[in-house]
Amino acid sequence: MSATSRKNTVRAAALVASAAMVVIGVQTGSATASAGKSASEPLALSAGARTTLIKDAQGQASATAGTIGLGAKEKLVVRDVIKDADGTVHTRYERTYDGLPVLGGDLVVHQKKSGTKSVDKATEAKIAVPSTTPSVAPSTAKKAALGVAADQKTAKADAGKAPRKVIWAADGKPVLAWETTVTGVQKDGTPSRLRVITDATSGKKLYQEEQIHTGSGTSTYSGTVNLDTTKTSGGYALQDGVRGGHKTYDLNQGTDGTGNLFTNSTDTWGGGRQTAGVDAHYGAAVTWDFYKNVLGRTGIRNDGQAAYSRVHYGTGYVNAFWDDDCFCMTYGDGEGDSHPLTSLDVAAHEMSHGVTAATANLRYSGESGGLNEATSDIFGTAAEFYANNPADPGDYLIGEKIDINGDGSPLRYMDKPSKDGASKDYWSSSLGSVDVHYSSGPANHFFYLLSEGSGQKTVNGVTYNSPTYNNVKVTGIGRDKATKIWYKALTTYFTSTTNYKAARTATLKATADLYGSTSAEYKAVANAWTAINVK
């Protein structure tokens, strides 16, 4: 959630909480899902139905590859299937070439009930290389990747797993490459999983990406909240039987494994080490309910299975992170181990990285990296509004409770991103070279404008004054519609390489699906993109 350049200390008052959190039921939020559902909104599929759709799509993958014009050496591997209420099926594929994974070769095939097909691709380049025999040895690629880790000051760097031979197609012309993963520990104590792509012919580094995304914050006091727990022989455990079996663990300042599942003799929780566990359990429940009740998504991967949460990570660790490998959310205890980073906005933001990984898988650099970060800000904000918690009302301020700057100011502002001193308000040709936490600014700005409109406005007691490029006036369509448009674009039209221009196209397609291409919503989306200089 925060850029690596941000300071690692948080100056904030200690959390003041009641001695107990009363557990009385299911946290359901305040939104409703069924009223006014569009025919182009996704169906809430059971795990079995989704599995059947994926299996059927994989059985037809060879025929589909031929239909959309792929070469004889190319094959499709199904990643996900979404079915709309009107019968349209969106199938997301990864691609292989001569048996090798094609990174940046992902695509989505859209098939209407009538049988009509259309395709969105991460690259339009023809996938072909002169040879799949590398000139550069895997040991050379491994050494180069360890060098990149050393430059990043990665401690305990290890590239024990052999490099994987791939086709790199994310930057245009496909090339044969080595993909090396280096594990270790980042400078601030966050685990590291650094992916390095090396040209297998020239030895040149093509790409690098830190795959564990981090966030910063201080635990917010959410008041008395409802939790779902599980009865055990000795009392109760923080295991949610309603939401895919989500569990919350105490790492006891460790950095590996799961630690101990939180248990209690009664079903009343809070105080001491339990408070961080309550916050994390609550945050996971709200995030689950938001995705299910507002967007029809059951779990981060839409397969009905929950992630798990770990609190009390490390010693003095001032961060929190999502790790797609363990499929888990982890929180440190903050400066002096006195401020657990278990706030709702941190939880929803970070777990939304998991949703992005399971759908468009936006690569974490350049403009697509900014869109990745913005997606987490957008859904984190939407989840905060959905929670409708009077102790933490929804707003368009990112990290407003964490005081990472030491002066009470938020981490980011959606109405005018540049107020944080680094984020960008509008798109420009140089945006791709900006840190992804700051290149997220224009997309955050787009979402605010689409939701609320330009100019001055007060929402839940917070005053905003959103400017636009060339003073374009924008009339908002409401946060609920804006959220659904972004979600549909992410899950059915975005690919791993989507940039701002492609995001405009994708959200307009999504809006046309949901509300029609002549609707006021369609015109508002186009206008909001123009207002951040994306045309």
Image (tube, rainbow, N blue to C red):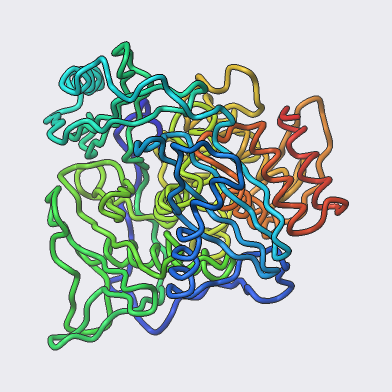
Residue at 43% over, 80% down? 26
- Would residue 390 be visible to someone looking at this image? no
**211 horizontally vs 60: left or right:** left
Q: How many marks?
A: 0
* Foreground residue among 91 and 450: 91
Quadrant for the C terminus in the image: top right
**312 horizontally vs 90: left or right:** left
Residue at 27% over, 52% down? 330
Provide residue 357's location: percent of width, then percent of height. 42, 47
Q: Is residue 374 above or below residue 277?
A: above
Q: Quadrant of residue 327?
A: bottom left
| Residue found at the far right of this picture | 518
* Foreground residue among 26 and 316: 26
- Would residue 134 be visible to someone looking at this image? yes
Quadrant for the N terminus in the image: top left
Provide residue 498's location: percent of width, then percent of height. 57, 35
Q: Quadrant of residue 184?
A: top left
**184 horizontally vs 31: left or right:** left
Q: Is residue 504 above or below residue 351?
A: above
Provide residue 223's location: percent of width, then percent of height. 41, 68
* Foreground residue among 305 and 167: 167
